[in-house]
Structure formats: structure tokens, C-alpha cells
Image: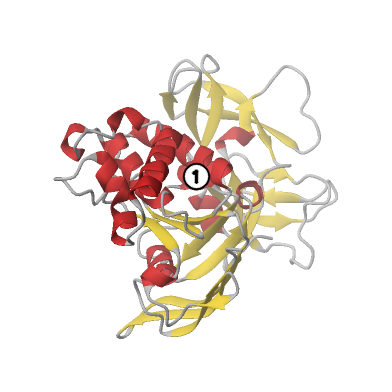
Amino acid sequence: MAEVRITSLHKRYGAYHAVKGIDLAIADGEFTVLVGPSGCGKSTLLRTIAGLEDISEGEIAIGGEVVNDMRPRDRDVAMVFQDYALYPHMKVAENIGFGLRARKMPPPEIAERVNRAAAMLGITALLGRYPRQLSGGQRQRVAIGRAIVRNPRIFLFDEPLSNLDAQLREEMRGEIKRLHQGLKTTMIYVTHDQIEAMTLADRIVLMRDGVIEQSGAPLDLFEKPASRFVAGFLGSPQMGFVPGTLARNEAGDAIRLAGPIESLPLPAGRMPAGIADGSAILLGIRPEHVSRASGSAPGPGIARIDAEIELLQPTGSRSFATLRLAGTPVLAELQAHDVSRPGQRIPLDINLNRASLFDAATEKAL
């Protein structure tokens, strides 16, 4: 079993409190991604699990065994870093098997494990090459292979794809996910890239200022963010946030806005309970929730507006168009030929059934 349980974990560097009372349970075989902006504590948390950093308070248990005072080499974890850290004077096969030789494993078993890992990663033809003869993606595969041959209880990845270009990052994301599906080993992966988090994770742990802001399945965080921070961090392009006030009237519940578009009707049942009429809120709208209006009347929870397009960003099959609601820029994800130029006015439908509401003061979801 390789369940990881973290209880009330704190990490301080002098007066700086990097990790602030984290409680986290990671199930055996789960792929958990720690994500968040730089300085949020995600890499520090990973390094405490590996034993590379001593904790200030709390407890870390792996497979039911408390490892607080255990040396890194005795925790049975394998770590893949951003820096490949390959030995330049050793060939690929020697690099992959180095840790096994250090543990005095018999040469035939080392060869068997190296060959099996190389086949799994598609680098068998590279075993006789030196690191200088490899591309960045190939070097990262070698670094992952060095971790695989150890057959650890847990794999720890600390931003392993940061040094790769966009195409290689996409390719390696697929390789890592395929690797997890094959090995079914617990993996904890650190990144600041929300695309990596969404595509790889069984569960995302989104951190902010040393604490967990929200944890759950990727689509749960994307569709039901607990705060404005979560909603703004996940999604590309980002969610737009429009200030307004809640309004209860005879015509039905609505969000009152400033400017030419005075209000947007709330779908039935979306008025937050216990929130006073006139309360300041933020309306969260993702680009995919705004589309060009069709000729038919809008359905329930769909607000139809006439908007001027300020900026147009074609991407091929679709275009991102910038409009303004209550003076706030909002993106619409449109089909490639829905709008031809900036300055054009077109009818748009906003799907308020999928919009998010946040308290303007606390920025928590309503």
C-alpha cells in the first residue's frame, strides 16, 4: 500500500511560514497534482514528502508508516526533477541503472529492469547513447526511466516538463499519463501549469499562500470553484468577472449591472439563499459560456445581449472575441466566422446556467 497521509503539516524557514497546517490524504494508486502560483508552497510540500526538507510540525505517513524521521533513501520514493540531472559520462543504460548498481543489485536483474523501463518509455534504441546526443524530451524520458527501475511505492514529480517546448510538453504529458495507467502507482506531481493539472490529475490540490484553496476532481474544480481564485486560476483563457448586485423583483431574480446592459436574469433557483437584496457580487463567465445568438428565442437561463466586439483573436477553428459587460472585458469563444472584424456589433447568448457567483467582499462562491 502507498497511501500518503499528511496531518497538520507546517514548514517554516525562520520567520517565513511556507506551508501552513496542510491536511491531505492521497489514496493508493492515485495521481494527485499539486498546482498553484509560484511561492504557494507546492514544491516545499513535495520535498517534505520526499524527505529532502524537514517539517516544522505535523506528520507524514506513507503506507501507514510515519516517516517524519526517516531518511529520503529509506522512504521508498522516487523523484523526478525539473533538471534531468543525468551523468554526462554515462550512457543512457548506465544512467537508468545507476541507482540499482549503488544498491548492489545483481547485473542481470539491473539489465532486465533497465530494458523493461526503456521499452515502456520507447527509448530502447537510445540505451547506447550519451545524454549530449539526446533531445530534451529524450533526456526527460531517461530521468523518468531511472525512477521507474527502482519500483518505488510513490513517484514524485517536481515540474518535470518546465524545460521543454510546447510540443514536447504535450507529448510528455501523454507519456506520463500512459505510464500511470500502466504502473498504477501513487504519483504526486507539482506544476504551476493548470493545463498540465487538468489533463493529468485524478485529483487536483490547488494551493495558495501555503494552504489548500480547494481539492477535488479536475472537472469539479473547473465547474464548481470554491472561490474567485480557483475560478480564475483554472481555465484558459481565464474566466471573466463582472461586478454587479443581486436584485429581487416582480420580473424574477436578476443581477443588476452598470452601463447599457442594466441587468441579466438569473436562472430559476440560482439566487443564493440568505443573501440580501442589493448585495454586491461578482458574476463569473467563461468564454465557452458566450456564443453567437441563433435566430430562435433564447432558452431558460440564457441572456441575449447586443455587444460590440473590441478585440478579435482568431485561433483557427474558433476565435476569442472581447466585449464589455459593466465596463469589464469578457471573452466569448466563437466559431471562426461568427465575427469578421473589431467594432462589429453582434447578438450574443450568455449561458447563465453555467455561470458562477461570488461574494464581492470575501470572493467565496455563493
Relative image position of residue 352 (x, y in whole percent) = 70, 41
Q: Quadrant where the N terminus lies? A: bottom right
Please name the colour scheme applied to the rendered image: secondary structure
Q: Nearer the viewer, residue 318 or 260?
A: 318
- Number of numbered tags placed on the structure image: 1
Can residue 160 be seen in the rendering of this structure? Answer: no
Q: Nearer the viewer, residue 4 or 170?
A: 4
Relative image position of residue 283 (x, y in whole percent) = 61, 50
Q: Is residue 151 left or right of residue 93?
A: right
Q: Is residue 134 left or right of residue 24?
A: left
- Packing grade of label 1 (10 A; few <14, some 14-19, many >=20) is few
Relative image position of residue 268 (x, y in whole percent) = 83, 47
Q: Which residue is situated farthest in the right direction here?
A: 250
Residue 274: image quadrant is: bottom right
Vertical order, 11 against 148 (above or below): below
Residue type at mark 1 is Gly
Relative image position of residue 77 (x, y in whole percent) = 44, 62
- Name the residue carrying label 1: 327
Vertical order, 121 against 18 (above or below): above
Q: Nearer the viewer, residue 264 or 186?
A: 186
Can residue 365 be seen in the rendering of this structure? Answer: yes
Q: Is residue 40 left or right of residue 305?
A: left
Vertical order, 245 against 324 (above or below): below
Q: Secondary structure at mark 1?
A: loop
Q: Quadrant where the C terminus lies? A: bottom right
